[in-house]
Amino acid sequence: MNSSPSPSRDVERLKARIRDAGLRCTAARLAVLLVLSNAKSPLTHAEVAALLIDRGIDKATVFRNLVDLVDAEILSRTELGDHVWRFEVRLEGSNENEQHPHFVCLDCGAVSCLSDLDFDAPSRLATSRVGNIKEILIKGVCVECQPAS
């Protein structure tokens, strides 16, 4: 038996999350949230808009909804050193201090979430002497771009 939630249950959960944040659940807002919920890494405004253009949702509407969802703390907005904002869905119940690190490939620009990295209590304590760290960005060359050995 498959224990994963059905797509319709996921949509209902996202609708409830939008409403619980005090926002109206419009078709465009839900579409933006669905795109980001299914993304494997943070997406730019242009990437989200490109995925929704054939549904009749224009770039300005996508941008307004991205901002609304960030303000409602449903999405997080991250700048990874290239002056481009990227958006991703926050885990329910998380706060802005619970961001996960990201990896950016210096060759192709691909962005990957490193949400499975755990910064344990000693690591967090060690970083506290420099300040309150809001984001960790790791740069390197991804496996796709590494030369064959």
Image (spheres, grey):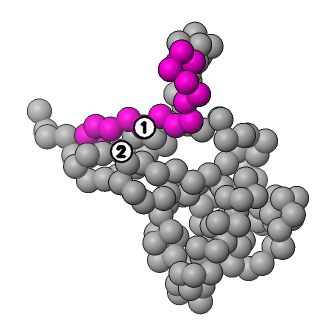
Q: Tell me the amino acid under the disc marked 1.
A: Leu
| Mark number, residue 104 | 2
Identify whether 106 is placed above or below 126: below
The residue drawn where x is 37% and y is 48% is 81
Residue 128 is one of the magenta-drawn residues? yes
Q: Residues within 10 Å of mark 2 (few under 14, many from 20)?
A: some
Residue 13, horizontal then vertical, whole percent: 81, 59
Q: Nearer the viewer, residue 15 or 9?
A: 15
Label 2 residue SS: strand
| Mark number, residue 137 | 1
Residue 105, horizontal then vertical, whole percent: 30, 45
Q: Nearer the viewer, residue 9 or 100?
A: 100
Q: Cα distance, mark 2 to mark 1?
A: 8 Å
The magenta region covers 127-143
The residue drawn where x is 76% and y is 58% is 72
Residue 107, horizontal then vertical, whole percent: 22, 49
Dominant SS type (magenta) = loop
Q: Residues within 10 Å of mark 1 (few under 14, many from 20)?
A: some
Dot 2 or dot 1, earlier in sequence: 2
